[in-house]
Image (cartoon, helix red, strand yellow):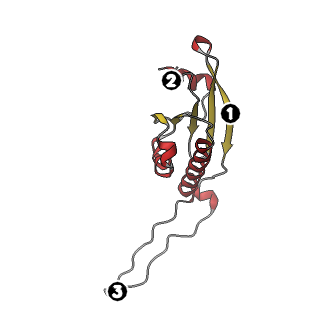
Amino acid sequence: MILDDRNTLVLVGDGRKALFLRQIGRGNKASLAVDQVLQDDNPATREQGTDQPGRTGTGSNGRTSAIKETDWHRLGEERFAAGLAEMLYRRAHAGQFDRLVVVAPPKVLGDLRQAFHQEVLDRISREIPKQMTSHPIEDIARMLRE
């Protein structure tokens, strides 16, 4: 298994859900157990309501420009990642883990990397760019063994 006898935490997350997993047992009898689950209610942008895309006023040349519509869902995902990063910083600072394995889709992984404090970055032992939050724990454990 990717985990060893050290105090390792596994974060399996996406823009809405985060599973914190820990290894229980050792060797061939090792498995993963859920340590904590966080879920954010972040509906699609169309469900969050939005105005029509705006337009800027005329400039000296008499032209107008469109303003890009805000992606509220994406902003919610970024806020969720920032919240996870803050929680992991507090947990690292409290000595709750020595190593961190992060499993998340590429966009979320990028959001997390930008939000992680150096103390958390120093503890990351592996990053896996996959969407696994909806998979059973056994599938996640099998993937970590590969």
Q: Residue at x 58, y 33 (%)?
A: 9
Residue found farthest to the left: 61
| Amino acid beneath label 2 | Ile
Q: How far, Cα to Cα, is label 2 from label 3? A: 61 Å
Note whether 95 is above or below 76 in the view shown: above
- Contact flag, marks 2 and 1 (Cβ < 8 Å): no
The residue under label 3 is which amino acid type?
Answer: Gly
Q: Is residue 60 above or below residue 92?
A: below
Q: Residues within 10 Å of mark 1 (few under 14, many from 20)?
A: few
* Residue at 34% in and 86% down: 62
Q: Which mark is on residue 84?
A: none
Residue corresponding to mark 2: 2
Q: Which residue is mark 3?
A: 62
Residue type indicated by callout 1 = Asp
The reply to whether the C-beta atoms of the residues labelled 2 and 3 are less than 8 Å apart is: no
Crowd band around label 2 with a 10 angstrom C-alpha radius: few (<14), some (14–19), many (20+): some
Visible residue check, residue 108 = no
Element carrying mark 2: loop
- Horizontal and vertical percent for residue 98? 55, 34
